Image (cartoon, grey):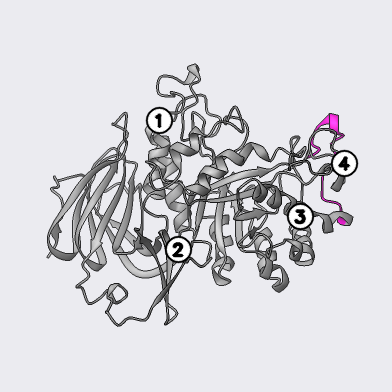
């Protein structure tokens, strides 16, 4: 029997989504970069993170990226430390990083370049300009042993100023020769640096800090594959990372995720904007394209998605620039933030399930979907970019008893996530739902615990005690919020502890 979980009219066609209990990656979260530029005045402006981060926010981001900048003033050696105020611009991200950490989030740093004195061109700049002699800036081999101690000084600076950094990366876009701060590495050069010198990252002093691979411009898998196929380097690397410029998620990133999954490494997309530097506010179709990118990243095996700027007219928080108004009010959440919230508020901490989709004859197939399990809920994402509404048939691996439909269509000017309850008369695994035209939909369905198919949701009073860890694998004495629950039998799952 097919339950009519919500009143549906006859639409252009029927899309059938079958969700399996095949499980893939567990999603660590979503975030954005706190870098100079639109974040002005840099170092004092914390309004974007206050609007975007933490479970109490409307958007629910939990990962923040910041630059580990090199020294620019004369490319001088770091002086004797005076209250940890260095020529490096490290303090600019501190206020925002503190707020993110206070709200339970993850912060990580990316070098755009090592200090100029360590490089072949003698400057932190990438070298691609006439004024720099078009000389490629690379880390000198005789300075490989200085690189990780330099990262340690960043970790120490942040720790002394109240922020325990969760991860550091090797390099921003090692394959992109630039005229701004940058450093080139071949895949082999990165491998040599990691396998021979990454042990110098002081993981004992900065407990829990993880090492992220270099972040190539188009998620070139040759960078990560070379690392993961080498046992010594593989032991040092915790997260495989990259960007999506010129290469959509189901290409290079999906390819990179194959070895990462084999060796239990996370996969983070650490920078992209699908409409960066456009001369207008993104229209609703462009927002749906962004939703599709998020969805495709999940299908590719991504465990962390980090957008580029937090504040820009094409990002999450308005800048106030008059040429992009109306709709670009400073420090007001933009539609793209609400699109992100479908994933950041609900997919964070979940485990992706397998999905297949089929469409009825004559139905436009411009449709994407993904599904997840988190605690007692099955979450189904559905994105339809067409001009016609459809009916959505869901076939689930578990019986569900109730739910909620979160809908974004671009018609609302304020809160772009309209919430409607889904009423189910009796537990079922077959649903027929409404899929509006040009819409982003999140269906959150509560599993019927009485269903025999869901063994992991059944608990007994005599069950063995559990231990809890944060999303970085660190043990928790007092679990709160999103945690990893591990049982005596070795099984684990992500849960939300409300205390």
Residue 486 occupies quadrant: bottom left
Disc 3 to disc 1, C-alpha distance: 39 Å
**Does the CB distance between marks 4 and 1 fall below 8 Å?**
no
**Counting residues from the N terminus, which is met first, the one under dot 3 or under dot 4?**
4
Mark 4, other Cα within 10 Å: few <14 / some 14–19 / many ≥20: some
The numbered disc on residue 283 is: 1
Mark 3 vs mark 1: which is more N-terminal? 3
Quadrant into which the N terminus falls? bottom left
Q: Visible in this render: residue 495? A: yes
Mark 3 or 2, closer to the camera: 2
Residue 272 appears anywhere in the view: no
x 84%, y 37%: residue = 75
Q: Which residues are magenta?
A: 126-141
Q: Residue furthest right?
A: 142
**CB under 8 Å between discs 3 and 1:** no
Instruction: Give the Cα separation between the discs numbered 3 and 4.
Output: 19 Å
Q: Which residue is mark 3?
A: 186
Residue 142, percent from left and from top: 89, 56
Q: Are marks 1 and 2 in contact (CB under 8 Å)?
A: no
Crowding at dot 2, Cα within 10 Å, few <14 / some 14-19 / many 20+, comes out as many
Describe the element under mark 1 as helix, strand or loop: loop
Nearer to us of marks 4 and 1 is 4
The residue shown at (29%, 31%) is: 412
> Which of the 4 quarters of the picture holds residue 199?
bottom right
Q: Main secondary structure of the magenta part?
A: loop
Relative to the observer, which residue lies in front, 52 or 384?
52
> Would you name the residue on which mark 2 appears?
26
């Amino acid at each position: 029997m097919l339950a009519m979980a919500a009143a549906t009219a006859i639409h252009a066609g029927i899309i059938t989504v079958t969700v399996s209990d095949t499980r893939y990656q567990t999603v660590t979260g979503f975030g954005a970069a706190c870098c100079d530029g639109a974040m002005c005045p840099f170092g004092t402006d914390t309004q974007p993170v206050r609007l975007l981060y933490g479970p109490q926010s409307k958007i629910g981001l939990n990962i923040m990226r910041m630059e580990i900048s090199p020294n620019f003033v004369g490319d001088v050696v770091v002086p004797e430390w005076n209250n940890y105020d260095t020529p490096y611009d490290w303090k600019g991200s501190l206020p925002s990083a503190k707020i993110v950490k206070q709200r339970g989030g993850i912060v990580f740093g990316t070098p755009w370049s090592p200090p100029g004195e360590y490089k072949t061109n003698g400057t932190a700049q990438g070298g691609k300009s006439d004024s720099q002699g078009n000389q490629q800036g690379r880390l000198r081999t005789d300075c490989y042993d200085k690189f990780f101690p330099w990262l340690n000084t960043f970790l120490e600076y942040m720790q002394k100023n109240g922020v325990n950094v969760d991860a550091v990366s090797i390099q921003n876009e090692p394959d992109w020769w630039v005229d701004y701060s940058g450093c080139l590495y071949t895949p082999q050069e990165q491998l040599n640096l990691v396998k021979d010198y990454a042990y110098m990252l002081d993981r004992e002093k900065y407990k829990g800090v993880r090492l992220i691979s270099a972040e190539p411009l188009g998620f070139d898998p040759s960078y990560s594959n070379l690392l993961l196929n080498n046992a010594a380097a593989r032991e040092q690397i915790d997260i495989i990372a990259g960007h999506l410029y010129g290469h959509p998620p189901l290409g290079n990133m999906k390819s990179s995720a194959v070895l990462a999954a084999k060796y239990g490494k996370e996969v983070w997309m650490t920078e992209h904007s699908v409409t960066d530097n456009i001369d207008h506010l993104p229209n609703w179709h462009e927002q749906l394209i962004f939703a599709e990118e998020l969805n495709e990243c999940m299908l590719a095996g991504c465990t962390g998605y980090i957008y580029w700027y937090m504040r820009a007219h094409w990002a999450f928080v308005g800048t106030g620039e008059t040429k992009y108004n109306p709709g670009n009010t400073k420090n007001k959440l933009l539609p793209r933030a609400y699109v992100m919230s479908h994933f950041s508020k609900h997919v964070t901490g979940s485990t992706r399930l397998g999905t297949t989709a089929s469409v009825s004859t004559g139905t436009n197939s411009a449709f994407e979907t993904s599904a997840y399990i988190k605690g007692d809920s099955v979450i189904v994402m559905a994105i339809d970019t067409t001009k016609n509404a459809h009916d959505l048939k869901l076939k689930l691996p578990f019986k569900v008893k109730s739910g909620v439909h979160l809908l974004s269509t671009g018609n609302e000017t304020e809160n772009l996530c309209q919430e409607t309850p889904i009423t189910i008369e009796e537990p079922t695994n077959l649903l027929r739902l409404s899929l509006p035209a040009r819409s982003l939909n999140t269906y959150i369905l509560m599993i019927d615990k009485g269903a025999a198919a869901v063994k992991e949701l059944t608990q007994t009073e005599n069950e063995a005690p559990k231990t809890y860890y944060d999303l970085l694998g660190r043990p928790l004495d007092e679990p709160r919020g999103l945690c990893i629950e591990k049982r005596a039998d070795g099984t684990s799952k992500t849960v939300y502890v409300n205390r």
